[in-house]
């Protein structure tokens, strides 16, 4: 019989302003059995954000102490602020057979891929640079200078798409959420999630013999 499986690490990433946070919230509302890993950051808290819900907001010295202690699965400097993924929460849940969702920037996703290549990496792309600029302006969270800075990295960030397992264009929020949900369901059903490849033939032979 097929046994239990180790948890799956799902990583959602893409350019700033593409809608990763909104998609993450919609996905968590629809998918059962998946834990969201809250990132830590040194950037200022925005209106409506709650410490420990949206991010763990840390002072720079505390963040640097955690870096030195190896407490992050990944960390990066993004637009002059630190961002990182606490290591213990992710690894503990995966080892307990629970799936984990990360919604992180492209730098962070690159580090995760190097350290945990068995994860599932999903690139969220905007329909166009023009649409991305419009979304950044409409969300009203950044100054015009910060928006220009973010958009200046567009080509470099989009070039990373070749390193991901899946690419989803966020042109329709509902349809994009459905596609992400389908990816999670399909990955959970892969045979290799339950048994190693070198055990597949033996496992199915045993089941066939038992059924005779």
Image: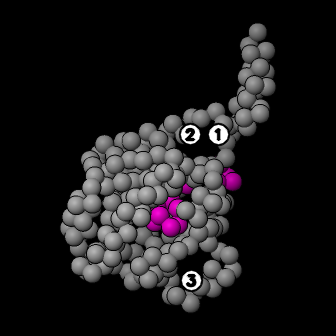
- Residue 43 lies, with reference to residue 179, above or below; the image says below
- SS under mark 1: helix
Residue drawn 44% across the image and 69% down it: 53
- Residue count near mark 2 (Cα–Cα under 10 Å), binned few <14, some 14–19, many ≥20: some
| Label number found at residue 31 | none
Is 93 placed left or right of 140 in the picture?
Answer: right
Residue 63 tag number? 3
Residue under label 1: 193
Horizontally, is 63 left or right of 134 in the view? Answer: right
Q: Residue at x 79, y 21 (%)?
A: 206
Residues shaded magenta = 94-109
Q: Quadrant of the C terminus?
A: top right
N-terminal of the pair, mark 2 or mark 1, is 2
Which residue was labeled with disc 2? 188
Across and down, in percent, residue 29 comes to: 39, 51
Quadrant of the rendered image containing residue 182: top left
Q: Secondary structure at mark 3?
A: helix
């Amino acid at each position: 019989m097929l046994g239990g499986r180790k948890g799956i690490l799902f990583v959602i990433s893409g350019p700033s302003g593409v809608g990763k946070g909104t998609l993450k919230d919609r996905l968590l509302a629809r998918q059962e059995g998946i834990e969201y890993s809250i990132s830590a950051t040194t950037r200022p808290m925005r209106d409506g954000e709650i410490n420990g819900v949206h991010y763990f907001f840390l002072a720079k010295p505390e963040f640097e102490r955690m870096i030195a202690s190896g407490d992050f699965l990944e960390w990066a400097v993004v637009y002059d602020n630190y961002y990182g993924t606490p290591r213990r929460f992710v690894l503990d849940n995966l080892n307990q057979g629970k799936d984990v969702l990360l919604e992180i920037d492209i730098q962070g996703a690159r580090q995760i891929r190097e350290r945990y290549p068995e994860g599932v990496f999903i690139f969220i792309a905007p329909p166009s640079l023009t649409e991305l600029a419009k979304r950044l302006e409409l969300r009203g969270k950044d100054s015009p200078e910060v928006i220009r800075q973010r958009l200046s990295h567009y080509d470099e960030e989009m070039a990373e798409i070749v390193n991901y397992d899946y690419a989803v264009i966020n042109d329709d929020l509902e349809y994009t959420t459905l596609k992400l949900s389908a990816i999670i369901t399909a990955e959970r059903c892969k045979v290799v999630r339950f048994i190693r490849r070198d055990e597949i033939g033996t496992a199915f032979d045993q089941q066939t013999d038992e059924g005779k």
